[in-house]
Image (cartoon, rainbow, N blue to C red):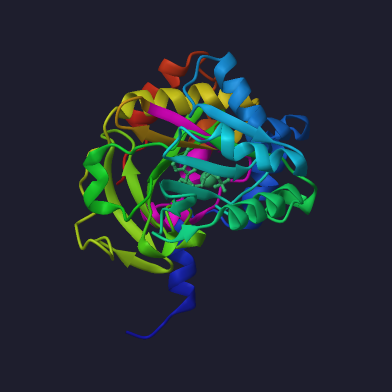
Amino acid sequence: MIFNPFAVAKRLRKIGLVGINQRNADYVLRYNKRKFYPRVDDKLLTKQLAIEHGLPVPELYAVVREEHEIEEVHAKLKDREKFVVKPAHGSGGDGIMVVVGRRGSKYRRANGLLMTEDEFNHHLSNALSGLFSLGGQADAVLIEYCVEFDPVFDHVSYRGVPDIRIIVFQGYPVMAMIRLPTRMSDGKANLHQGAIGVGIDLPTGRTCKGVWGNEPVKEHPDTEHSIIGMEIPHWDDLMMIAATASDMSGLGYVGVDIVLDKQLGPMILELNARPGLAIQIANGNGLQHRLQAIEALPKLAATAQERVAFSREHFGTV
Ligand SMILES: Nc1ncnc2c1ncn2[C@@H]1O[C@H](COP(=O)(O)OP(=O)(O)O)[C@@H](O)[C@H]1O
Ligand SMILES: [Mg+2]
């Protein structure tokens, strides 16, 4: 087949793919007030707000704000086998360490590698200096409960916790995907770290297409299991949590990242004021038509239930 750029552009327009400039100009700038950004850019603040709103989040074990607190943290964590270290203002999985066990005084990371206390301290010190953080300013480090993902996804994730991203526009969930960690992504579910993105059909909560880097995929590259047609447990709860979290954030256009713990159920990991656009590729569908459908509503529904019901009715895969 001969590559025809006009045909490609026409098809992209038809499926309503939103590009980065359009996302910023028409949605992020228009619907997200700057004063609310700290609520989502600071993971500590997001956690506090979520607790105030009765939304589930992983338990906070410790916060490190100053260099001299680093040494004390080992004692605080001595009874914890597993935990996650993350910069409060990090993004894209940078600086996150998923610790899954110990060997003597060493810590074992999700990728299997052992880390000495010194290396651990060095990582924390880098994180405090802002190495992994938005804007590069000094940061705080959170240490929290390590989510144990629901075993239904054991076959399709490699040593890590998949997360479910739901984009919510003016309180209405508009598109979702599940991100599956791979060997490459070191326990993290960020696409830029090498995780796979798999689209989710909003009415049914079933997975559809997948993308790994720029490639469409049907199987997990490490486990070779099919990633299509999986049913996400607690789908309605997840949609409700996303809609409620968007209310709490005050942002009109927001990505809500949720994980499913096998014992504790769904939990919010973080919110994002500039959610990436690869979700469209993972779904084989653009965001534009859905966003416009919400903009065209004569009146927005007041309750999260009504909004979730609307989205499940109108935003199917086809
Ligand atoms: N508490 C946790 N338990 C298990 N895995 C986690 C936890 N927190 C983060 N992760 C893993 O790291 C990834 C990135 O974490 P996240 O909080 O979303 O930060 P970022 O802003 O860097 O994306 C998640 O998608 C998940 O795979
Ligand atoms: Mg994230």
Residue 254 appears anywhere in the view: no
The answer to which quarter of the image holds residue 235 is: top left
Q: Nearer the viewer, residue 23 or 111?
A: 111
Apparent side of residue 246 relative to residue 41 in the rendered image (left or right): left
Residue at the spot 41% in from the left edge and 59% down from the top edge: 111
Q: Is residue 89 left or right of residue 291?
A: right
Residue 314 against residue 85 in the figure, above or below: above
Residue 139 is a magenta residue: no
Q: Nearer the viewer, residue 55 or 11?
A: 55
Nearest the eye: 109 or 159: 109
Please state if 259 lies on the left or on the right of 218 as rendered.
Answer: right
Q: Residue at x 26, y 32 (%)?
A: 233
Does the magenta portion include 281?
yes
Q: Is residue 112 above or below residue 74?
A: below
Q: Position of residue 21 (x, y in %)?
A: 66, 56
Q: Give the image location of residue 114, x and y in percent.
A: 45, 59
Query: Which residue appears at 56% of the width and 15% of the height?
Result: 53
Q: Residue furthest right?
A: 137
Task: Please give left or right for residue 166 compared with residue 236 in the image.
Answer: right
| Numbered range of the magenta stretch | 266-291
